[in-house]
Image: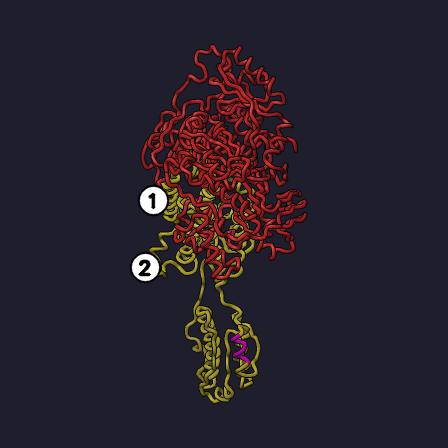
Chain colours: A yellow, B red
Amino acid sequence: MLERSRAIVRKETRELLRDPVYLGMAFIVPVVLLLLFGYGLSLDVKHLPVVFIDHDRSPYSRDYIDGFIHSEYFDFIGLAEDAAQADHWLRSGRARVIVDIPPDFARKLAGDRPVAVGVTVDGSFPTRANVIIAYVTAVSAQYNQRLLSEYADRLGAGGGLAQPLTMDLSVWYNPSLESNNMVVPGMIVLILMLFPAILGALVVVREKEAGTIFNLYVSPAARWEIVLGKALPYIAVAFLDYLIIYAMSIWLFQVRFVGSFWVLSAGALLYSACTIGIGVMFSVLMRTQLAAMLITFLTTMTPAFNYSGFISPVASMDAVGQFIAHLIPATYFMGMVRGVYLKGLGFDFFWPDLLALAVYTVVVYGLAWLFLRKRIG
Amino acid sequence: MSAIPAAYASRDAEKPFMLNDRIVIRVEALQRRYRRVQAVKGVSFEVRKGRVFGLIGPDGAGKTSVLQILAGVLSASAGKAEVAGIDVLRHPEAVKPLIGYMPQGLGLNLYDTLTVAENIEFFRDLRQVPEHAYRENRERLLAMTRLAPFLDRPAGKLSGGMRQKLALICTLIHLPDILLLDEPTTGVDPLSRRDFWTIIHELVASREVTVLLTTAYMDEAERCHRVALMHEGAIIAEGAPETLTAGLPGRLVAVQGVPPRAVFAALRGWTGAESVTLFGSEVHVLLGDSGEGLSERLRAAGLGAAGVREIPPGLEDVFVHRMVAADPEPPAPDPVPAGLEKPDADEAVEVVDLSCRFGDFVAVDAVRFSVRAGEIFGLLGPNGAGKTTLIRMLCGLQPPSGGMARVGGFDVRREREALRSRIGYMSQRFSLYRDLRVRDNVELYGGLYGLSPAERARRGGQLLEGLGLAPYRDRLTGSLPLGLRQRLALACAQLHAPPVLFLDEPTSGVDPVARRQFWDIVHLLAQDQGVTVLVSTHYMDEAEHCDRLGLMQDGRLVAVGDPASLKAEAEARHGPTVVVRAGAFAEAFQLLRETFPRAMLYGRRIQWQSADPEADLEQARRLLAAAGIEAQAWQQGLTMEETFVSFMEAQA
């Protein structure tokens, strides 16, 4: 029954192993992409360069500045001579925020009068700007708190009430709140979407362009034998990719992993089969490699990046966004990957996601089988 | 080579070879439409078991569509198609185990990164060939194709001829009884082509394989038992190759000894001639039904001194006759590009040890020849022989790796700018813009060559008029038939009146009528205006159109000379061809091969080259008579293809 599929599998494997372009696309590009995203896409905002214009140059102002310097969220760039120099640093990107301390800073505070500090934030990235504002606010609040308790002490009303409510904060699943714990597992989902789908998209259409497709069309091989023979080697490639990325996530990026490797692998295998199937389906439909690649890229990568929950949680999307999210396989696997990595959840929790992936897989291979006519017209 | 099974060896066998006349392929009123284009217009034919049937015609005739429908990979719009009694249109999958199908293009069904052995293995596994049958068949096919030493070489690194033979092995590995081969010999070198036909006839003789193949070469018809000439989706003639030429109503004569240009002018437009074609120093005239009045006509034109001799018509003459009959007003231009100024033509082409290497690959290997002004020089060779690279170097488009070449007195390496204004280049597949109108293309190329708007209009108008393209001025180039596009490309290459023209495979895929008209134009350019023409082709029968030829193979020039002396030289080496035609050709072949091991089967004919043709003929006649086989035997001169093979073998 499977002999003809096996013939195609063997041929595909040999071709893949001898073609440096495909081999590179299968194994090198995913690794490079993971490195780029793993190191480059940090959603944490730390070490923000800050510059001060200290018109006051008093112990008070230095005290306030110390509050920034001792925080890991800010990097002290320097004291600007004047506003023009500070502006220049902000514009050139050396600084992201300017804190302008007025000349009467110490005098007013010593006189128990309020004083305004000028804060100028680089707003070109709104999310980062928001974080900066929050941090500056926090540092200033801390300073205020100190001033306030000193004031209370001086009035003789000091003591425990300086901070009436404190939080006992604990963060679960990603205690250090490192974005790598979220980004790297998410990359598994994206990489296993993009490369398998594109490789799958080329497998049939490549033979159409070369003319070798007639070998399959005029052979007695059944349509499902052809689809299976084409898909299987690339599912193996995708699974190998998964193993490589998994290993890198643990040993290179030190991502917290508390779940079961077997649960994750089962999901990865099903997901790989599914994404390869999407590619193969387009490959059967299209006439040129370029068209097949483009449509595969557009229909897999764009929704996976935006709607799978990679950047922002699905639950926080609007109704349309959530609808799209549930149409793409990446969403189901994204939930699984993060759940396994950070929460250690098992099959009992993920069976609906696995089922959704399985249904998806059956549908794409069914369509590929249906569209493969063994005819040119 | 395998022995012919015993069943065919004995004449007393109960079921002699030719009596098994079962129809294996039957096509009836078959039609296929692609959107607006009717590619196949009601085609009907039958192929009997153990025969080689050729569908012959130019590109776009519908040959490939018919083959693809029979292979079950293309649906038909109407009609019937049966293979081995199975309705292909209803049950395409049922046919597939029975057939071997080889698509068009040199070894296009091969996987380039897989080795020869792995390619064969893949086809075995795909077809599930039983191990014992596989082993025996593989050995046999490898021996026949002489590919055994290359088993570990990737298919992508084989030469064109070797690829084609490997493709044939892959098509034959499951021992199919029916072979559908789409242009299996187009662009293949003559030696590989001879191997190919030997294999085909071997299979037919030993296993009664039925073969349906397509070809663009008219001269391959004689190797088929039966042929159908296809043109624009319809069969315009069908029959055994011998009877087809016999059925030609008129006579074919060659007029020589007087200026051919004058003969051409005198006979053109004469109703007594069906076609008038320039062949170098001769004019071939296909006379109509009566054939009367030729000499009067010549005398009236002051050409009474002309010698007229009758020559045997070829299949192409049949084709032209039928095309003219089917379409009484062919798109014939007056192929006299009237009123063109004669360019200064004292210069020509001089090539000394010119080479071109791409990495390890030597595309052109120390080629040396020269072309006189006003000469038509043909580069004849298969795909991949280096013809295109050589022409591109001579046009200054490809820097040579070694050697020297001067075109029109200019060095192709150092004086490229000056060179460009002296040459016209018509590239393979004609680099015209298909989405532009005819006159837009002329305008564009005129602009590219730096002609002023006034010159462009004058010169462009003249050329379009002269080449019969004026009525198509406002048509989209892509909508023109191939023959007209070819003429437009020629017009564009000549806008700046270059003294040297390079034409790279200008006639590939063009129909015979358009091909003849094209060659007429080329002759007139050379004769009237002294234009030097360097033209490449893989059609062996076009060699006759050239004043001199260079035979190219694997980047080397294996011979240079005029067609007649090349043939004479080859004939002096291996002798002329002895031909035996017999009704019971399989038996005759079996009999003769014992005595003449070089004998080969070509359709119904058995041929071999003989150093002593008189003795061989006598012995063959004696053998055949003793065996009671009725046959005719004669000797004939070498064809250009046989000449080419002779030079290739002499080199090796």
- B346 above or below B7? below
Query: Looking at numbered disc 1 in the image, what kind of residue is underneath it?
Result: Arg
Where residue B492 sits: x, y (%)?
Answer: 49, 52
Kindly identify the residue that appears in the image at 53 percent across and 79 percent down. A86
The answer to whether any part of residue B417 appears in the image is yes
Query: Is most of the magenta stretch helix, strand or loop?
Result: helix
Chain of the residue under the numbered disc 2 shown in the image? A
Q: Nearer the viewer, residue A47 or A280?
A: A280
Specify whether residue A88 is painted magenta: yes
Kindly identify the amino acid type of the residue bearing the numbered disc 2.
Answer: Ala
- In the image, B146 versus A276, the foreground residue is B146
Residue B92: % across, % down: 37, 32
Residue closest to the eye, B285 or A282: B285
The numbered mark 1 sits on a residue in which chain? Answer: B
Q: Magenta segment, which residues?
A: A85-91
The x and y percentages for residue B596 are: 59, 19
Q: Is residue B222 above or below residue B483?
A: above
Q: Which type of secondary structure does the marked residue at label 2 adopt?
A: helix
**Separation (CA) of disc 2 from disc 1:** 47 Å
Indicate which disc residue B36 carries. Answer: 1
The secondary element bearing badge 1 is classed as loop
Q: Which residue is mark 2?
A: A319
